[in-house]
């Protein structure tokens, strides 16, 4: 009698021990996920990075001053002068409200932290949450082992790190967490069929919709999954509860975010969910009828329903098609269409094509960004079929679609990252479980008893590794791996129970060592990438000096500070749109265009001004009340992403609206873009050239280079000495990276206009040389 | 924060008016010392108007217009001819003087030096080539100009109450050189023009291709700079002289017209140039919401679309040290965002308050009130004030609209139906 009781208590104890172990591993993963993203703060400082985060930061600052309601109705008169921007209605408020809420809570707790610090550390915090969400998601799909393995991989996957280092205060920082969490809630609802979880799914989706435009990925993935379930005959009430409320409530949720509004029912992105919603009902109805009617009547009814249904469907389809065909983009937004047709943007929307993160990725970037996950993910795809459940089918579909989208845009590698990590985690846990189970089986014949030793073995091994392991990363990973193994063997023996044959002991050991080695390499790579490649804020640049020291280029902030201290608060500042957010946030000045590229014409106007000769540019800027113009120039120190290199995009975007700007005029005779003596004439006359190279030749030859040598283009510039008539240089930063010019006023006097009656002036008396006192110098 | 961007000359004008009471300093540069005696009436007139004159020869070695960063004089009067500017003054510094908002009256004659010509050119007036004189074989004065036909009776004066408040009874006697003004010039205009038969050339020599001829030729040109500094350029020294003031005008047909109008004209010119006439002053610019989001808000930070707002400004005309309410029906104000969305005339109440009430457009953005008033002879008024117009806040829309009643009804019926079905489902036994 004592035997079973003891066994039960032993099982309970083992279970408790397992729970603690999993919790501890998860905690380690979270700490790791956050801390690996702090390199940017350690190496540089706690600043907001890049471009878009500055807008989010500025709105968050506004929120911290004015509150949530004011932010919701925020009309910003500092951007897109003179159009202004209804920020509250054109932004995804999720990130900003999240950071604002955190800041408010901290204030309530009497923790006086600046809102900038909250913004900087939001992304690391949410990457820890993302690891937890991944664990939960994969636990639903395949069990705790797969969950832990996936969480351990996503914690440090470089692709995700690139968008979520401390300071990278962008929408993706919280959106990836939201994405995975919505998937978890969907699968949870699907597995349990509980309305409570369906409600949770609605709230999770609401947060996702509020956070990122990528919600439309979910809005299409869920219908695809549902459709697949219908096609493969997996329709169930659980599916209905997971899917149907989400369609209706999700559309309502989306419609309540001002930036989406009626798009939630009007744009083609959302059509699939409604279509599948109808199909699901039809499928359920057919099933219901089949249960009720005798077979003969059923086939008659089926014929009837199919006839009517297909007629009705045809009519609806015709209506939808006619509605959609009326729109030039077939009802899709430009960005979505460029996903479906990768050549669309480069053909029609240069402004989308001009953004580097909208380019297709190179093969090497898959390996850099995913590393071992890109190797393991295909294995994970296969394992999704053993066995194929609703949940694993979802993972399968997610992985396949994400691979496609990532191939279109570099930026969407970010969507692929969780999928790849989950698939890789699945593969990893299954492989490890299989190998260690084989190991155990080799030691003790009898598969049923294999579980216990393998588990304790895992614990001991984990401890051993921790004591000997040098870095926290290795320890956490090791724990995760071991835990993954345990989870798989314990929670889901399904994959192994059927017809599994253990591999020989030696093979198992070698396999485990290989897995361990691969993971070590992955971690090494990820930490290296996090520290060296993805931590640069791009607002502060560093370069290594030959003596090993670090040279810091802080020109951007220097110039923005100059603007904020030396110009009138009402001054309008023009620049290429890349720098709009930074100017409003750091210099606190009104800008003409910024990174929210909603108005192509306005951007084209600035592009046209930059591409026009000086006088015409002056007229354009005067008509926009611009007082200062700045350009980013890298020719002095060799900073390649400067305005001269972006100039062709200005020409293209400007030429798209103003046909007088023709790209060939800006190219050299050989059709190449160049600034040397072969350069196109229009380029040499353009304002951009003049503002970039004004006085450049006089700044002194560097390192024996000839006069006027541009270190980015590696040539001597064509036109070296020229004067500006309508612009006045007011500031050039230390390394010439930012050059600020004042747009001169209309002259006070109308002197020397064309006058045919003018008699020629004789020899003029030379101007006198006066001393500062006003007296004549002797 | 009301954001005002005003390129407003009023500050400068007010400075001018304020210091008019404290005696403004005028540097008078004379080509030759004898001019002080020959032009005593004109100079005395200036003194009597309250200017402190500092009379110096034009080529004085100690001339100084500026000491360190301070201008030593408020106005500059040059009665110049062939001599160059002496001391520390040169054309560039006079231009700087004007750009600093100070006024210059420059009179030259046929012997004009190249330096003064280039100065005039920098100020926007082109003086004819040295040695030329204005000749009119049909309009000369019978007694004074019989010999060379170069003393002319000119009556082609500018029609602007700001320059000449009263019409001149007789012509102006003019002996000197012609000027011209570029056709596109927004700043310069001719105050005294030639007659259709006048031309500028060498006296006594035949001329077939005079560059300057007819009404397009100027004898006296006035320039109103964009910063509202004023410059007068006269092609004659003689017209300011006592002799010309006293002369009797006699037409070629020997019709005696009486005393010339030189004194009145020259006084008017100097008054105009020294900001005593034709000065408009805009003040108390304001705008308020009449009906809308915040009725009664004065100079609000921003409007809401479709608000009813009122723009108002007080414009006064200052002459001879006193300001009167300005009366005109052609003052307009615009509400501009890229294009003018509203352009409307301002109505005045005879006390100088100009106001207009408008309904804002149904467009949001950063709008500017722009009042740009440029009339011949008057100082420019250019006011801009930026006021963003915001859209409705999310809770400012109407809560219930008539058109949506079918929708409300469908919602209500849906809820009622759900309740009914729910009750039926729960409380009936199958």
Image (spheres, rainbow, N blue to C red):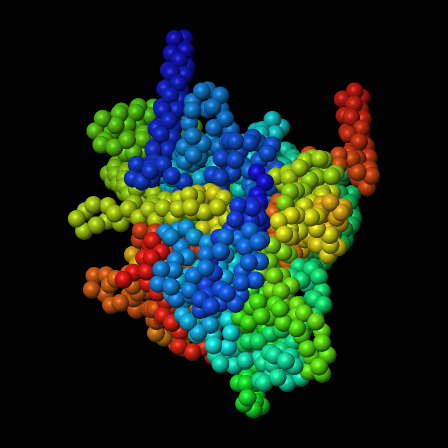
Residue in the picture at 48% in, 46% down: A568
Residue in the picture at 26% in, 25% down: A463
Residue B181 vertical placement versus A701 (above, below): below
Residue in the picture at 76% in, 22% down: B426
The furthest residue to the top: A1
Q: Is residue B79 visible?
A: no
Looking at this view, is B170 or A495 the one in front? Answer: B170
Q: In which quarter of the image is the C terminus of chain B?
A: top right
The furthest residue to the left: A547
Residue B210 vertical placement versus B333 (above, below): below
Looking at this view, is A725 or B375 the one in front? Answer: B375
The number of numbered badges drawn on the structure is 0
Residue A675 vertical placement versus A161 (above, below): below
Where residue A199 appears, as percent x and y from the top left, is: 61, 29
Where residue A630 appears, as percent x and y from the top left, is: 43, 55
Residue in the picture at 71% in, 45% down: B353
Q: Give the quarter of the image for residue B141.
A: bottom right
Left or right: residue A258 compared with residue B416: left
Q: Can residue A112 be seen in this view?
A: yes
């Amino acid at each position: 009698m004592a035997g079973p009781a003891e066994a039960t208590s032993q099982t309970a104890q083992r279970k408790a021990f397992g729970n603690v172990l999993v919790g501890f591993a998860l905690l380690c993963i979270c700490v790791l996920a956050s801390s690996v993203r702090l390199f940017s703060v350690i190496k540089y400082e706690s600043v907001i990075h890049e471009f878009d985060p500055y807008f989010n930061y500025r709105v968050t600052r506004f929120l911290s001053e004015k509150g949530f309601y004011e932010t919701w109705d925020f009309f910003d008169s500092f951007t897109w002068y003179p159009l202004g921007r209804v920020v509250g209605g054109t932004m995804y408020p999720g990130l900003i409200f999240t950071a604002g809420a955190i800041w408010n809570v901290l204030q309530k707790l009497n923790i006086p932290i600046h809102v900038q610090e909250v913004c900087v550390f939001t992304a690391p915090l949410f990457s820890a949450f993302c690891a937890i969400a991944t664990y939960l998601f994969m636990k639903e799909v395949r069990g705790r082992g797969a969950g832990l393995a996936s969480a351990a991989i996503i914690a440090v996957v470089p692709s995700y790190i690139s968008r979520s280092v401390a300071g990278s205060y962008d929408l993706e920082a919280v959106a990836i967490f939201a994405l995975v969490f919505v998937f978890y809630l969907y699968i949870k609802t699907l597995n349990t069929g509980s309305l409570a979880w369906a409600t949770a799914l609605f709230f999770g989706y609401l947060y996702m919709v509020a956070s990122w435009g990528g919600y439309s990925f979910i809005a299409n993935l869920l219908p695809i999954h549902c459709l697949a379930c219908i096609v493969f005959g997996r329709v169930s009430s659980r599916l209905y509860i997971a899917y149907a409320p989400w369609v209706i409530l999700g559309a309502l949720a989306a419609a309540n975010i001002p930036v989406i509004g009626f798009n939630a029912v009007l744009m083609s992105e959302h059509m699939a969910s409604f279509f599948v919603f109808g199909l699901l009902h039809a499928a359920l109805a057919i099933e219901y009828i089949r249960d009720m009617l005798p077979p003969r009547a059923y086939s008659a009814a089926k014929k009837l329903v199919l006839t009517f249904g297909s007629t009705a469907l045809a009519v609806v389809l015709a209506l939808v098609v006619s509605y959609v065909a009326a729109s030039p983009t077939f009802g899709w937004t430009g960005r979505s269409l460029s996903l479906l047709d990768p050549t669309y943007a480069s053909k029609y929307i240069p402004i989308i094509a001009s953004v580097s993160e909208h380019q297709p990725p190179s093969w090497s970037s898959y390996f850099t960004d995913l590393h071992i996950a890109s190797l393991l993910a295909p294995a994970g795809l296969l394992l999704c079929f053993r066995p194929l459940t609703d949940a694993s089918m979802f993972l399968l579909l997610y992985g396949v679609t994400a691979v496609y989208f990532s191939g279109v845009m570099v930026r969407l590698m970010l969507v692929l990252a969780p999928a790849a990590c989950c698939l890789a985690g699945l593969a990893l846990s299954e492989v490890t479980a299989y190998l260690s189970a084989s190991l155990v089986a080799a030691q003790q014949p009898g598969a049923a008893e294999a579980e216990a030793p393998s588990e304790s073995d895992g614990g001991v091994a984990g401890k051993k590794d921790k004591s000997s392991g040098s870095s926290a990363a290795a320890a956490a990973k090791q724990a995760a791996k071991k835990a993954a193994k345990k989870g798989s063997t314990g929670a889901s023996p399904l994959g192994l129970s059927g017809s599994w044959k253990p591999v020989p002991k030696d093979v198992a050991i070698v396999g485990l060592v290989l897995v361990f080695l691969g993971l070590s390499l992955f971690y090494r790579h990820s930490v290296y990438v996090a520290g060296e490649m993805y931590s640069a804020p791009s607002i502060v640049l560093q370069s290594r000096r030959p003596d090993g020291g670090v040279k810091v280029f802080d020109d951007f902030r220097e110039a923005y500070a100059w603007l904020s201290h030396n110009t009138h608060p009402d001054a309008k500042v023009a620049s290429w749109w890349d720098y709009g957010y930074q100017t409003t946030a750091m210099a606190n000045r009104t800008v003409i265009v910024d990174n929210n590229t909603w108005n192509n014409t306005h951007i084209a106007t600035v592009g046209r001004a930059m591409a026009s000769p000086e006088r015409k540019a002056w007229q354009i800027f005067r008509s926009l009340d611009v007082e200062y113009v700045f350009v980013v120039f890298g020719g002095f120190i060799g900073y390649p992403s400067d305005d001269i290199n972006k100039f062709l995009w200005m020409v293209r975007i400007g030429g798209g609206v103003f046909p007088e700007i023709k790209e060939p005029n800006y190219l050299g005779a050989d059709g190449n873009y160049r600034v040397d003596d072969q350069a196109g004439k229009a380029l040499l006359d353009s304002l951009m050239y003049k503002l970039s190279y004004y006085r450049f030749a006089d700044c002194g030859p560097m390192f024996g280079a000839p006069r006027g040598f541009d270190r980015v283009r590696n040539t001597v510039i064509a036109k070296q000495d020229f004067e500006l008539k309508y612009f006045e240089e007011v500031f050039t930063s230390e390394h010439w990276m930012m050059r600020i010019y004042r747009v001169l006023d209309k002259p006070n006097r109308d002197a020397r206009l064309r006058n045919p009656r003018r008699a020629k002036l004789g020899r003029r008396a030379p101007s006198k040389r006066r001393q500062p006192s006003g007296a004549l110098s002797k | 924060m009301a954001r005002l961007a005003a390129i407003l000359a009023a500050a400068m004008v007010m400075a001018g008016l304020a210091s008019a009471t404290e005696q403004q300093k005028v540097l008078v540069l004379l080509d030759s010392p004898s001019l002080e005696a020959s032009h005593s009436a004109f100079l005395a007139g200036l003194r009597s108007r309250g200017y402190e004159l500092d009379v110096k020869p034009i080529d004085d070695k100690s001339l100084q217009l500026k000491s360190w960063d301070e201008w030593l004089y408020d106005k500059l009067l040059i009665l110049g001819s062939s001599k160059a500017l002496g001391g520390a003054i040169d054309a560039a510094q006079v231009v700087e003087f004007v750009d600093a908002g100070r006024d210059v009256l420059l009179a030259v004659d046929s012997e004009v030096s190249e330096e003064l010509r280039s100065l005039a050119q920098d100020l926007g007036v082109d003086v004819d080539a040295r040695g030329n004189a204005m000749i009119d074989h049909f309009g000369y004065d019978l007694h004074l100009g019989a010999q060379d036909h170069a003393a002319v009776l000119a009556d082609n004066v500018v029609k602007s109450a700001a320059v000449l408040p009263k019409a001149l009874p007789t012509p102006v006697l003019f002996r000197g050189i012609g000027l011209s003004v570029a056709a596109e010039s927004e700043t310069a205009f001719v105050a005294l023009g030639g007659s259709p038969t006048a031309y500028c050339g060498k006296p006594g020599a035949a001329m077939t291709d005079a560059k300057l001829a007819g009404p397009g030729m100027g004898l006296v040109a006035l320039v109103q700079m964009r910063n509202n500094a004023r410059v007068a350029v006269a092609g004659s020294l003689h017209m300011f002289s006592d002799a010309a003031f006293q002369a009797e005008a006699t037409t070629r047909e020997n019709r005696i017209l009486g005393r010339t109008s030189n004194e009145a004209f020259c006084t008017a010119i100097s008054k105009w140039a020294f900001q005593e006439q034709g000065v408009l002053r805009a003040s108390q610019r304001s705008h308020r919401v009449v009906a809308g989001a915040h009725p009664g808000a004065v100079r609000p930070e921003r409007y809401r679309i479709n608000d009813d707002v009122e723009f108002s400004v007080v414009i006064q005309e200052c002459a001879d040290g006193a300001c009167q309410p300005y009366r005109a029906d052609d003052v307009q104000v615009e509400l501009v965002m890229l294009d003018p969305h509203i352009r409307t005339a301002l109505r005045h109440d005879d006390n100088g308050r100009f106001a207009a009430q408008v309904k804002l457009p149904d467009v949001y953005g950063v709008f500017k009130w722009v009042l740009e008033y440029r009339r011949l002879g008057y100082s420019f008024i250019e006011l801009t004030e930026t006021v963003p117009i915001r859209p409705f806040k999310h809770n400012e829309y109407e809560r219930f609209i008539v058109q949506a009643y079918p929708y409300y009804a469908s919602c209500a019926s849906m809820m009622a139906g759900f309740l009914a079905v729910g009750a039926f489902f729960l409380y009936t036994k199958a």
